[in-house]
C-alpha cells in the first residue's frame, strides 16, 4: 500500500457492512448475541466489537429484519436468540447485491492501479 | 466460588453499570437494549474475554442501535469523558480496593470537618483532639462512612470517575496541611516558642529575630501589648520570682524589671516581667477595708503565654498547689 500515513482499519470498514455481516451470519443459523460475535470472529472479522454487534442486532430487530425469542438457561441468565424474518432475508439480498457491485468496482480500481504500477 | 459463578456475578455487575450509563433513556428502551446482556457477557468471559469499560460499551451499544447518545447533546462532554476515561484507565487496577477508598474518603472528610470546626492552631486533627468528646467524632465518622459507602455503591462510570477526581483534588489541600503541620522536627520543638505549651502549631519561622523592647516602667497591659507586637511571649512574676496570673488586678501594675533586657532574640522568646503586687494592694486598699486579692500564684510553666497562643490575652486563674 502506498504510504499515506494511514492503514486500512478493519473496524472502519465494518461500520458500513456490519448489518450485512450480521444478517449473513443469522441467515445460516439463529444465534444469541455473543454467538453471533463468535461466528463473525471465526470468519475473520477479529476486530468486531461486541457492543457494536449487540446494538446492530437491536436495531435490525427494531427495523423488522430480525425476530427474537428467549431461551432459558439452567446454568445462568436467559439467552436472547435472533433469527431472520422475511424482511431480513430481503434486506440481506439487497445489501449483498449492493456490496457485490461495490466491491467489484473497488477491486477493479485496485487491480488497474496495480497493473499500471507493473 | 467457581469460575462460572464469578463470571455470572461480574456480568451482572457490568450489565447494571451499562444500564446506569443509559439512565437518561426511557426505562423501556434501556431494557430492550440490555436484555440478554448478562448471558452474552457470561459467554464472553467464559471464552476468555475481559470486562470492557461500561461507559465506552454503553456508548457503542447505543450508537450501533441508532440511538442518539444523550451525553452527545452536551457541549464539552467529550473532553470530560476523555479525562474521565484517562483516570478510569489509571484506576482500573485498583477497582477491588474501592471499599478501602470509601473508608479513606469518609476519614478525610471527617478530619476536614474537624479541622474546620476546631481550633485551627491545634497540631492534632484526630477525633479525640477536636470533638466535643471522642464519641462525637466516632458517631460522625460512622455517619460519614455510611454516606460514603452509599454514594460509592450507587456511583458508576462517569459519575464515579468524576467523584474520584474531585475527591482527590479536595484532599490535596488537606493532606498538604497535615504534612505542613507535622513538618517541625523534634529538634525544632520548643514548648512556648514555636509551640504553645499544651500543644500548638509552629507559628514562628526559625530565622525570625527581633530586639527585645524595654518595657520597664510601663504598666503590665502596655508591656504585654508591646511585647506581643514584637513577636515575644511573656510571663509575669512577683519580686520573689513566682508567676502571677495576668488578671484585672495585675494589668495596671508597673513593670519593675524585665529579663532579658534589650537584646536580639528569636521571635516567640518569653520575656519575664517583674511586678510588685503590693503596690496594687496599697493603692486599692481603703481605710478600714482589706486589700482586694486579684492574683494567684501558680507554678511557672502554667502562665507562659507566647504570642501564638493568644491575640487577646487570656487570664490564667489556676489555684496554687
Image (spheres, coloured by chain):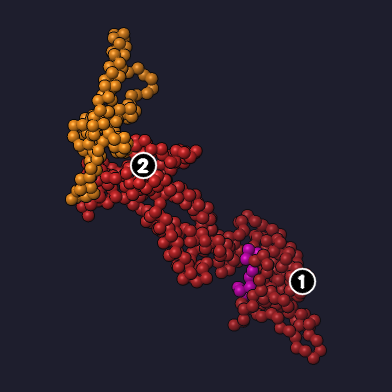
Chain colours: A orange, B red
Residue B265, x across and y down, in percent: 67, 60
Q: Nearer the viewer, residue B247 or B263?
A: B247
Crowd class of label 1 (few under 14; some 14 to 19; many from 20; radius 10 Å): some
Residue B303 in view (yes/no) = yes
**Magenta span dominant secondary structure:** helix
Residue B115 in the magenta stretch? The answer is no
Q: Are marks 1 and 2 on the same chain?
A: yes
Circle number at residue B276? none
Question: On what subunit does the disc labeled 1 rest?
Answer: B
Question: On what subunit does the disc labeled 2 rest?
Answer: B
Q: How far apart in space, not on screen, are marks 1 and 2 (Cα)?
A: 78 Å
Q: Quadrant of the C terminus of chain B?
A: bottom right
Q: Quadrant of the N terminus of chain B?
A: bottom left
Q: Quadrant of residue B293?
A: bottom right
Q: Residue at the location (74% across, 71% down)?
A: B220
- Identify residue for label 1: B219
Circle number at residue B58? 2
Residue A8, x across and y down, in percent: 33, 24
Number of numbered discs visible in the structure rendering: 2
Q: Indicate left or right for A60 with B277 as reference.
A: left
Q: Residue at the location (50% across, 71% down)?
A: B133
Residue A59, x across and y down, in percent: 32, 36
Q: Quadrant of residue B86?
A: top left
* Span of residues in magenta: B300-309
> Of all residues shown, which one is farthest toward the right?
B287
Q: Nearer the viewer, residue B307 or A29?
A: A29
Q: Nearer the viewer, residue B100 or A83?
A: A83
Q: Indicate left or right for B50 with B197 as reference.
A: left
Residue A22, x across and y down, in percent: 26, 32
State which tag comes first along the sequence, 1 or 2: 2
> Of all residues shown, which one is farthest toward the bottom?
B288
Amino acid at each position: 500500500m502506498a504510504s499515506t500515513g494511514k492503514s486500512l482499519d478493519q473496524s472502519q470498514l465494518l461500520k458500513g457492512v456490519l448489518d450485512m455481516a450480521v444478517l449473513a451470519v443469522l441467515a445460516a443459523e439463529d444465534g444469541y448475541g455473543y454467538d453471533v460475535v463468535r461466528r463473525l470472529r471465526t470468519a475473520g472479522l477479529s476486530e468486531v466489537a461486541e457492543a457494536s454487534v449487540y446494538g446492530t442486532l437491536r436495531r435490525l430487530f427494531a427495523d423488522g429484519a430480525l425476530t427474537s425469542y428467549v431461551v432459558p438457561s439452567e446454568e445462568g441468565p436467559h439467552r436472547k436468540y435472533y433469527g431472520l424474518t422475511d424482511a431480513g432475508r430481503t434486506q440481506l439480498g439487497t445489501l449483498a447485491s449492493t456490496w457485490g457491485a461495490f466491491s467489484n468496482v473497488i477491486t477493479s480500481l485496485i487491480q488497474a492501479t496495480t497493473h499500471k504500477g507493473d | 466460588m467457581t469460575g462460572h459463578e464469578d463470571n455470572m456475578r461480574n456480568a451482572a455487575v457490568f450489565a447494571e453499570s451499562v444500564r446506569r450509563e443509559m439512565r437518561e433513556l426511557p426505562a423501556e428502551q434501556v431494557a430492550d437494549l440490555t436484555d440478554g446482556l448478562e448471558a452474552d457477557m457470561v459467554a464472553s468471559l467464559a471464552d476468555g474475554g475481559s470486562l470492557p469499560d461500561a461507559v465506552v460499551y454503553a456508548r457503542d451499544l447505543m450508537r450501533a442501535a441508532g440511538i442518539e447518545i444523550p451525553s452527545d447533546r452536551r457541549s464539552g462532554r467529550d473532553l470530560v469523558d476523555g479525562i474521565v476515561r484517562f483516570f478510569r484507565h489509571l484506576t482500573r487496577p485498583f477497582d477491588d480496593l474501592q471499599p478501602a477508598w470509601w473508608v479513606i474518603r469518609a476519614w478525610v472528610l471527617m478530619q476536614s470537618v474537624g479541622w474546620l470546626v476546631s481550633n485551627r492552631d491545634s497540631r492534632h486533627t484526630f477525633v479525640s483532639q477536636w470533638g466535643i468528646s471522642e464519641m462525637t467524632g466516632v458517631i460522625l465518622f460512622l455517619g460519614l462512612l455510611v454516606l460514603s459507602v452509599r454514594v460509592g455503591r450507587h456511583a458508576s462510570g462517569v459519575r464515579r470517575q468524576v467523584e474520584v477526581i474531585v475527591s482527590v483534588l479536595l484532599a490535596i489541600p488537606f493532606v498538604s496541611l497535615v504534612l505542613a503541620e507535622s513538618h517541625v522536627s523534634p529538634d525544632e520543638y520548643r514548648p512556648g516558642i514555636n509551640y504553645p505549651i499544651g500543644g500548638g502549631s509552629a507559628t514562628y519561622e526559625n530565622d525570625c529575630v527581633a530586639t527585645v523592647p524595654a518595657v520597664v516602667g510601663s504598666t503590665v497591659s502596655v508591656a504585654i501589648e508591646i511585647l506581643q507586637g514584637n513577636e515575644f511571649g511573656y510571663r509575669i512574676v512577683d519580686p520573689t520570682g513566682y508567676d502571677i496570673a495576668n488578671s484585672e488586678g495585675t494589668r495596671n501594675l508597673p513593670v519593675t524589671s524585665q529579663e532579658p533586657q534589650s537584646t536580639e532574640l528569636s521571635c516567640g522568646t518569653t520575656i519575664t516581667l517583674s511586678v510588685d503586687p503590693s503596690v496594687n494592694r496599697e493603692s486599692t486598699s481603703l481605710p478600714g477595708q482589706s486589700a482586694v486579692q486579684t492574683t494567684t500564684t501558680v507554678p511557672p510553666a502554667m502562665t507562659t503565654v507566647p504570642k501564638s497562643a493568644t491575640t487577646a490575652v487570656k487570664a490564667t486563674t489556676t489555684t496554687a498547689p
